[in-house]
Amino acid sequence: METEGPLLSEKEVAGLTGLSISKLWYMRKLGIGIPFLKISPERTGRVLYRREDVDAYLVANPKPTVKKSKQKLVPPAQMIQPLTMTCEEASRRHQGITPVRIAHMCLLGRTLSKRYGGGSKIPAKDLARVIRAVKVGKAWAVPVSELDRVFLGKQG
């Protein structure tokens, strides 16, 4: 599945938002701020941002007219990105994919993980159709990184 809009580099986002690249890194480390995509799993992997996510951040956080010295970064509750979500939330995030389909992909991922002795050992031909998730009660805790890997084609 393709992304909805163009992807921007850290430099481009820094220019649009007025935040420094190091401030963007710090926000990613805290798990706040603008949602991002990491292209490779290494520490030095390339980070990209969706244009609509940057625009949404700018609407929610307009640029201050006066620069504040040593402003402490506190995550507002609405900006904290979840690490996991339910099948219904995942379906809303990736429109066109039903919650039942997501739950089926989670179940298939669990089955293949057991069969091959771990999620990292699942054959590549099956990896694109499974979501490695955790069963919590009667619901699935679906990792956002897994959703992006499967539905956005992000390797991870």
Image (cartoon, grey):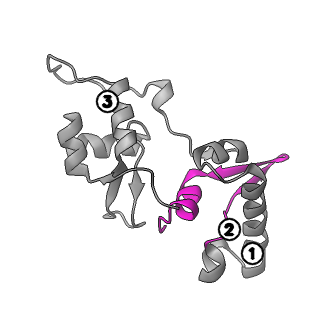
Mark 1 or 3, closer to the camera = 3
Please provide percent x and percent y for residue 154: 47, 64
- Tag 3 secondary structure: helix
In the rendered structure, find residue 112 and report the number of the disc placed on it: 1
CA distance for labels 1 and 3: 42 Å
- Tag 2 secondary structure: loop
- Check disc 2 and give the amino acid type: Val
Judge by depth and name the residue closer to the eye, 132 or 101: 101
Query: Which residue is located at x 66 percent, y 42 percent?
Result: 89
Image quadrant of residue 122? bottom right
**Left or right: 84 in relation to 70:** right
Mark 1 or 2, closer to the camera = 2
CB of mark 1 within 8 Å of CB of mark 2? yes
How many numbered discs sit on the rendered protein?
A: 3
Q: Is residue 51 magenta?
A: no
Please provide percent x and percent y for residue 15: 17, 41
- Check disc 1 and give the amino acid type: Leu
**Left or right: 92 in relation to 29:** right
Dot 2 or dot 3: first in sequence order is: 3
- Tag 1 secondary structure: helix
Dot 1 or dot 3: first in sequence order is: 3
Q: Is 156 placed above or below 140 here?
A: below
Mark 3 crowdedness (10 Å alpha carbons): few <14, some 14-19, many ≥20 = some
In the rendered structure, find residue 58 and report the number of the disc placed on it: 3
CA distance for labels 2 and 3: 34 Å
Mark 1 crowdedness (10 Å alpha carbons): few <14, some 14-19, many ≥20 = many
In the rendered structure, find residue 103 and report the number of the disc placed on it: none
Dot 1 or dot 2: first in sequence order is: 1
In the rendered structure, find residue 130 and report the number of the disc placed on it: 2
Q: Which residues are magenta?
A: 128-156
CA distance for labels 1 and 2: 8 Å
Q: Is 104 placed above or below 27 here?
A: below
